[in-house]
Amino acid sequence: MITYLTYKEIDKQKWDECIRGSSNGLIYAESVYLNHMSPNWDALIIGNYDAVMPLTWKRKWGIRYLYQPAFTQQGGIFSRKRLSAKQVKSFIDLAATKFKFAEFNINYANSLEPEKNLKVLKRNNFILPLGNGYKNIFSGYNSYIKQRLSRLKKFSLKYATSEDYIAVIKLYKKLYRERMPSVTTTDFQQFEKLCKYFLKSGRVEIREAYDHEGIELLAAILLFKDNKRLYNVISCILPAGKKALANYFLYNELIREFSNQDIILDFEGSDIPGVSYFYNKFSVNNQRFSFVKFNNLPMPIKLLKK
């Protein structure tokens, strides 16, 4: 039986134990992540937190609706045992009785098919298992990547670590803010707070690529880390970095650095053709997940949210 719990009713310790113990557990579903990135979230739960689904919601025109928080790629159902498509659908059906409208992502382990009143779209997420040593990983690279890595040797780029998450976020906003109209100032502020929290527990990794003198910043990435994955949350490439192939250098060095750790490099997407092309060249493993939408709003509001 699936039970609906409000935020105050959720046992956060049991919740996090479920997420970390789930075969499909992801950092986005940890209570601290949800607390920072979603002002309101409730949950659907089976048994003694054997399976859980965060319900991140907002309110507009007096109507509550489900949405996907910023910097949160996947949600959906997390469980100790893999759920059937029928069980996944049961969660979605119950959510639809509590919320009239929804646009959110479920995770890669949740199987769901579209129906008349349920839109389901597949999205890309490329991953690269690490732990086999750099030589073995390099041998699996696409030939295009190997050519780029050979070409960029002439630039003699420098690889560096940092803890300045504020500088990386500032650069990210400068480069890409116009492409993300749905990400608000508050979202960025909450994300900064989340980075600060994770940094204290060693769960933030920042890597940068500089020119041969180690002076000019060319590219930067900010990743979150748990015991299963490195999450490529923010990636920045400056104009000079594009000319110097800095992104290829930066990700290759990151892979080299973590190549002996038994974790997955999660590229976090993408459905943007150029970005998808880049990540796909590093990894052919596309661990697709689904975007879900339903609209049970009353008329005429329903027509405004088609």
Image: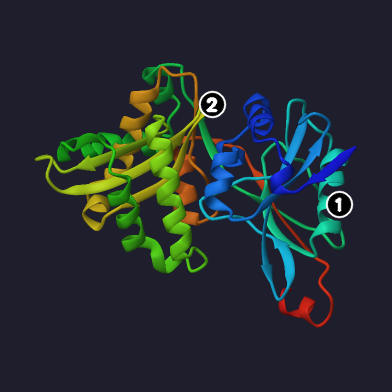
Q: Residue 255 sits in which quadrant? A: top left
Q: Which residue is mark 2?
A: 228
Q: Residue at x 32, y 45 (%)?
A: 165
Other residues around mark 2 within 10 Å, as few (<14) / some (14–19) / many (≥20) = some
SS for tag 1? helix
Q: Residue 161 sits in which quadrant? A: top left
Q: Position of residue 35 (x, y in %)?
A: 57, 47
Q: Residue at x 41, y 69 (%)?
A: 178
Q: Which sits in the foreground, 166 or 244?
A: 166
Horizontal arrangement in the rendering, residue 166 relative to residue 68 (left or right): left
Kindly identify the amino acid type of the residue bearing the numbered disc 2: Lys
Q: Which residue is mark 1?
A: 93
Looking at marks 1 and 2 on the same chain, the residue that comes earlier in the sequence is marked by 1
SS for tag 2? loop
Q: Position of residue 200 (x, y in %)?
A: 38, 33
Is 94 placed above or below 138 here?
A: below
Is 59 placed above or below 66 here?
A: below
Q: Position of residue 190 (x, y in %)?
A: 46, 53
